[in-house]
C-alpha cells in the first residue's frame, strides 16, 4: 500500500472513530467521551501540518 492510499485510509478510520465517539457522548453524556472527541478532533489538524521535512526541521529546532 503506497503512502497516499494509507493516508486516506487512516483519515477514514479517524473519521469513523470520531463519529462513534460523538454517538457515545450524545447518547450517554459521558464527559470522558466528549474529552476524547475533542482530542481526536485536534489530532488530525496537527498531523496534516507535519511532513517528514517539517518534523525533521522541528527536531533540529528543539535540539538547539
Image (spheres, rainbow, N blue to C red):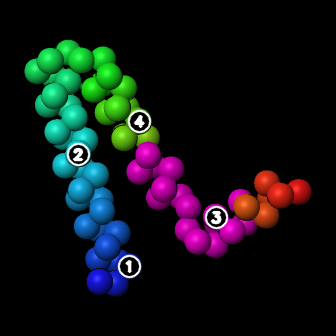
Disc 1 to disc 3, C-alpha distance: 17 Å
Q: Quadrant of residue 8?
A: bottom left
Q: Say few, some or many: other residues with alpha carbon within 10 Å of mark 2 (under 14 / 14 to 19 / 20 or more).
A: some
* Up/down of 2 relative to 50, above or below: below
Q: Residue at x 20, y 15 (%)?
A: 29
Q: Which residue is mark 1?
A: 3
Looking at the rendered structure, the secondary structure element under dot 4 is: helix
Q: Which stretch appears magenta?
A: 43-58
Looking at the rendered structure, the secondary structure element under dot 3 is: helix
The label on residue 41 is none
Q: Which residue is mark 2?
A: 17
Q: Quadrant of residue 30?
A: top left
Q: Residue at x 18, y 40 (%)?
A: 19
Horizontal arrangement in the rendering, residue 50 relative to residue 14 (left or right): right
Residue 12 pos. (x, y %): 23, 58
Examine the structure image and report whether residue 49 is included in the region drawn in magenta. Answer: yes
* Up/down of 2 relative to 26, above or below: below
Disc 3 to disc 2, C-alpha distance: 25 Å
Q: Quadrant of residue 38?
A: top left
Q: Earlier in the sequence, mark 1 or mark 4?
A: 1
Q: Earlier in the sequence, mark 3 or mark 4?
A: 4
Horizontal arrangement in the rendering, residue 35 relative to residue 18 (left or right): right
Q: Residue at x 35, y 77 (%)?
A: 4
Q: Which residue is mark 4?
A: 39
Q: Which residue is mark 3?
A: 55
Q: Residue at x 31, y 73 (%)?
A: 6
Q: Main secondary structure of the magenta part?
A: helix
Q: Earlier in the sequence, mark 1 or mark 2?
A: 1
Disc 4 to disc 2, C-alpha distance: 12 Å
Disc 1 to disc 4, C-alpha distance: 24 Å
The answer to the question of whether label 1 and label 2 lie on touching residues, with beta carbons closer than 8 A, is no
Residue 25 pos. (x, y %): 20, 24
Amino acid at each position: 500500500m503506497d503512502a497516499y492510499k494509507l493516508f486516506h485510509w487512516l483519515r477514514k478510520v479517524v473519521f469513523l472513530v470520531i463519529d462513534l465517539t460523538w454517538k457515545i457522548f450524545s447518547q450517554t453524556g459521558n464527559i470522558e467521551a466528549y474529552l476524547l472527541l475533542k482530542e481526536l478532533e485536534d489530532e488530525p489538524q496537527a498531523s496534516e501540518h507535519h511532513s517528514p521535512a517539517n518534523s525533521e526541521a522541528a527536531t533540529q529546532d528543539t535540539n538547539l
